[in-house]
Amino acid sequence: KKRVVSGVQPTGMVHLGNYLGAIKNWVALQDLYETYFFIVDLHAITLPHDAAELSKSTRSTAAIYLACGIDSSKASIFVQSHVRAHVELMWLLSSSTPIGWLNRMIQFKEKSRKAGDENVGVALLTYPVLMASDILLYQSDLVPVGEDQTQHLELTREIAERVNNLYGGRKWKKLGGRGGSLFKVPEALIPPAGARVMSLTDGLSKMSKSAPSDQSRINLLDPKDVIVNKIKRCKTDSLPGLEFDNPERPECRNLLSIYQIITGKTKEEVVIECQNMNWGTFKTTLTDALIEHLQPIQARYEEIMSDQSYLDNVLLEGAEKASEVADITLNNVYQAMGFLRR
Ligand code: TYM
């Protein structure tokens, strides 16, 4: 079976971008592949974080995975820091990752520019190496993510190839190893729709957890009245009718796409249904569809959160299964790099 891995950071609220770009697509994959879905808590400390909040949002994010339909009898669901191999492999990989490759990462450039050099920990720079470790440990074939992660995925592939060349194959065999590649070179799986959900207040910027205004995003756990209010106040335009493909109307494209995915309709069906609507009618239609889609998720979330021992158990089992697989890769890399094993 092919392997699939992916994760979400437990910072702030999980929003519609995380859901449509990533989590929602994981659900179908768990029936076809061997899947590993983790909560990347170690990534959540790359910017200043609230220690009292971290464990809470880690639990909450895990509960959201389950509420969205990730099934612990099919997928391994776990917390990244519970599987030590992630940090260990990261160190080994970082010795073969040129600083120049990391300096080029767009997310690093953007985030460090905002915070200023003296306020940025080195983890913000080396973060993509940890992400590579998350992926390569499981010999993953596919990594279902939103479009903003493509550069990190490309870096992961480059690191995998470089380490394979430096330490794999015949050299590894000479040291008593199996020979061949140390890592499978993974591919990103970007959804055809939903890969880049845009802000509600600006159709040209991405919906994000770090945007200061909560009005710019729909959080998965937003109550009904909040959703009504956010859609009522979201940015639109004054052109007649609604259309997907007019580059002058990014908000229109974004809201129609959200409506399309959330209802499971085709683009053509949405065009026929909505092209002659005015904004007022469409906003009501979209709001109703969002509430209808999110309410069952929210109900399941409450149920899961009310039974902490169930959740703990899922995470414990997930970490155990993941560790077994991860340790095989980690031990191979130690061996191929020439470490003395105890
Ligand atoms: P994070 O936590 O920022 O986002 C989690 C997932 O949500 C997707 N996403 C979006 N998709 C569509 N539209 C948006 N506006 C939007 N915003 C976020 C992201 O692409 C991502 O798939 N580095 C990663 C987490 C990570 C990871 C990994 C992912 C760490 N290790 C290994 C896959 C495999 C991150 O910060 O995602």
Image (cartoon, rainbow, N blue to C red):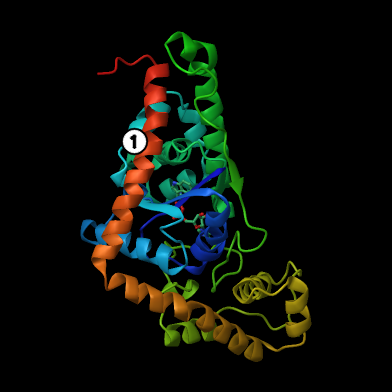
- For label 1, the SS is helix
Query: What is the quadrant of the N terminus in the image?
Result: top right
Q: Would you say residue 46 is visible in this rendering?
A: no
Q: Is residue 261 left or right of residue 131?
A: right
The structure residue drawn at horizontal position 34% and vertical position 36%, both measured from the top left corner, is 85
**Residue 33 locus on image (x, y percent):** 55, 49
The structure residue drawn at horizontal position 77% and vertical position 87%, both measured from the top left corner, is 276
Q: Farthest residue toward the left? A: 52
The structure residue drawn at horizontal position 41% and vertical position 24%, both measured from the top left corner, is 332
Q: Is residue 161 above or below residue 272?
A: above
Of 152 and 174, the residue lying toward us: 174
Quarter of image, res 254: bottom right
Q: Is residue 190 left or right of residue 49?
A: right
- The residue pinned by badge 1 equals 85
Q: Would you say residue 100 is visible in this rendering?
A: yes
Classed neighbour count for the residue bearing mark 1: other residues with Cα under 10 Å, few (<14), some (14–19), many (≥20): many
Of 292 and 247, the residue lying toward us: 292
Q: Amino acid at mark 1?
A: Ala
**Residue 82 locus on image (x, y percent):** 29, 46
Of 279 and 157, the residue lying toward us: 157
Query: What is the quadrant of the C terminus in the image?
Result: top left
